[in-house]
Amino acid sequence: MINHIENYLKWLNDNMTQTEISPNVCEITTPFLDRHNDYTQIYVKARQDGLFQISDGGYTLADLSMCGMEFNTAKKKELLHQALNRLGIKLDEKHEILYITCSKSELPAFQHRMIQSMLDINDMFYLSSPNIKSLFYEEVKQFFDSHEIYYSEGMNVIGKSGFSYSYNFVLQRNREHPQRFIKLMNSANRSNAERIIFSWGDTKEARGSDEKLIVLINDDKKITDSVIAGFRQYDINPLLWSQRHENIQMFA
């Protein structure tokens, strides 16, 4: 049997580069793509107290701002802080830099947290559309509440690799269904799909149970068949948000 996790970690190692850009500061380029298809970069600074600070260098929020996405309402700010809090990322509001501080032994896991948060927040570009009537996250909550679907929010789990992953909702086990994790997907592109597939595979390896993952896809725009097929290949249940009523039994 192919060890998909080892293959994935080898791919990461083979496709990441490190450059010292100033004394005690390294720029790490990862193979993860943002919505511009640019490689995601993080910065690691060795501090005098022996700790390390990992940051995005201010890129994430500056890029969203230049593209018309401002966190200028209470609801948008709440969603931003929810995304940061899920993985323990802090925000330097004055300089709009995302950062986290850790020890040397924590560096790999915390670098992974930073990359995850940057990509999750980058995915919030959809909020810039003036035609959006409600936020996807809130719309999902309202749907669950109105149909008396009971859930927990913002659960973090540790995968076999030691990396931490966040899931938007968790539905408890019952007679008909195992415990179900739910991940929201606003931008249904290949990069985001691959990230979800790996995180779920790593989660399953650590937990060794019959738990399931449902990916709720915001299908305001056309979704390619390859994204749907990719999820199904890894026993992940993709569900188009427009088809939620026909598939409500998945949440029962």
Image: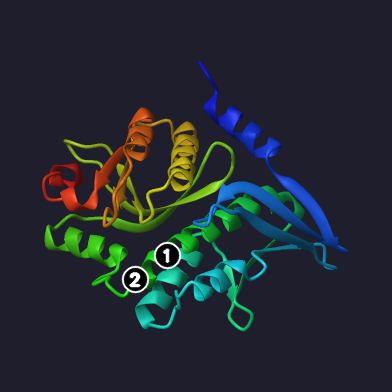
Q: Which mark is residue 27?
A: none
Residue at numbered disc 1 = 124
Circle 2 sits on which residue? 129
Residue kind at label 2, given as amino acid type? Ser
Tell which tag, 2 or 1, sits nearer the viewer: 2
Q: Residue at x 50, y 15 (%)?
A: 1
Q: CA distance from mark 2 to mark 1?
A: 10 Å
Query: Is residue 111 found left or right of 169 in the rendered image?
Result: right
For numbered disc 1, what is the local secondary structure?
Answer: helix
User: Residue 218: x, y in percent?
Assistant: 29, 55
Badge 2: residue crowd in 10 Å (few <14, some 14–19, many ≥20) = few
Pick whichever, 159 or 44, lies toward us.
44
Q: Is residue 52 left or right of residue 185?
A: right
Q: Secondary structure at mark 2?
A: loop
Which residue sits at x=58%, y=33%?
Answer: 8
Residue at (27% x, 72% y) in the render: 131
Between 27 and 107, the residue placed more toward the observer is: 27
Of the image marks 2 and 1, the number of the one nearer the N terminus: 1
Q: Percent position (x, y) of residue 106?
A: 69, 52
Residue at x 80% of width, y 53% of height: 19
x, y (%) of residue 239? 25, 44
Above or below 230: residue 121: below
